Amino acid sequence: MKKLKIAVQKSGRLNEDSLQLLKDSGISIDNGKDQLKAEAKNFPAEIYYLRNGDIPQYLKDGVVDCAIIGENVLVEKGNDITIAERLGFSKCRVSLAVSKMFKYDSIADLNGKRIATSYPNTTKQYLALHGVDAELHIINGSVEIAPNIGLADAICDIVSSGSTLFKNNLKEVEVMMQSEAVLAVSPSISDQENLILSKLRFRMQAVLKGRKSRYVLLNAPNNKLDAIVSILPGMKSPTILPLADDKWSSVHSVVEQDRFWDVIDQLKEAGAEGILVCPIEKMVL
Ligand code: PRP
């Protein structure tokens, strides 16, 4: 039987969330910390634990069929690889930063300067787009130290919380791209493996939609039901059930997490009481 070869980061910021997403998608795997390959127990898939930077090449060569990878790495090393799903975790940006002492007005200030980075392609493209000619120093890791030791005037690296920049007395001056974890697909995936990939995507979409939503239950006086229902978006329309007290009803609906607090405020104002909010494990529309 054919198996889908899925690459995940062996170690690093995506590893844990990637394995959690597979687990939430009903794919159980043995803890693979010290192994390179693991079989999924209840899904036709093999998990390959690979170095982040190697994953785009493995996708291009068809060694793996798909991968959970940072978009930043994909743009840097595999711009031609298709993104099948955006996964909503490991959000970060790829940015240019300079010393806090650097008087920075615009990107033109980087003309003739030295930039240290592990993202040479992304940096080159961005500089070319803005007509800036700078000297790139390619280093792998601890890029933020470069300006402090006189190796570079600026750096280009990923920024998440910004604390690494802060600790190194650097300031972010240009956001070159926003990034998050994505499901990327090999250009040479076979039809059979593509079918398995569709099943995986279906499961992941259900998990991701669930993560973005909350199930809301509330009590509403019947004379305010119309106003309350009009506030609730729901999957189709809210469920309304009678309560023992015939002047009241129970209303159930799904609310997007982003809009959640706004909706709750409006519901309270419209007369809703006893509002309960529950997480949703999976959501199939
Ligand atoms: C990245 C990046 C920065 C840091 C930024 O390193 O290289 O050093 O994260 O994150 P922050 O804005 O939250 O401080 P990572 O820890 O992923 O390891 P790496 O050095 O292997 O890239």
Image (cartoon, rainbow, N blue to C red):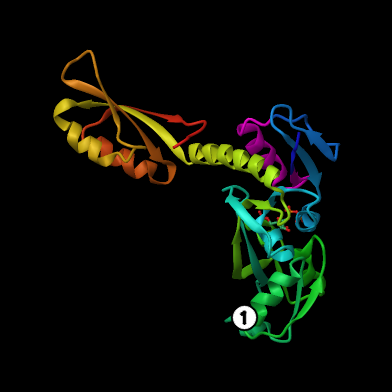
Residue 156 locus on image (x, y percent):
70, 69
Q: Which SS class for mark 1? A: helix
In the rendered image, residue 104 lying in the magenta stretch gets the answer no
Residue 198 image point, x, y percent = 60, 42
Vertical placement of 128 versus 26: above or below? below
- Of the 4 image quadrants, the one containing the C terminus is top left
The magenta stretch spans which residues? 6-27
Q: Amino acid at mark 1?
A: Leu
- At 74% from the left and 77% from the top, the residue drawn is 153
**Relative height, residue 183 to residue 36 (above, below):** below
Residue 67 placed where, x, y %? Answer: 71, 48
**Residue lying at 81% horizontally and 55% vertically, measured from the top left:** 54
Q: Nearer the viewer, residue 139 or 57?
A: 57
Q: Is 22 inside the magenta-drawn segment? A: yes
Total marks placed:
1
Picture quadrant where residue 74 is located = bottom right
Check the image and report above or below for 186 versus 11: below
Q: Is residue 25 above or below residue 141?
A: above
Image quarter hosting the N terminus? top right
Q: Residues within 10 Å of mark 1 (few under 14, many from 20)?
A: few
Q: Quadrant of ligand 1?
A: bottom right
Q: What residue lies at 23% left-to-right and 27% top-to-bottom?
A: 220
Residue 209 visible in this rendered orientation of the protein = yes
Identified at 63% across, 51% down, the residue is 182
Q: Is mark 1 within 8 Å of ligand 1?
A: no
- Expressed as whole percent of the image width and height from the top left, the position of residue 221 reads 18, 26
The answer to whether residue 160 is seen in the rendering is no
Residue corresponding to mark 1:
129
The answer to whether residue 217 is left or right of residue 210 is left
On the picture, is 174 further left or further right than 49?
Answer: left
Q: Where, by quadrant of the figure, is residue 56 drawn?
A: bottom right
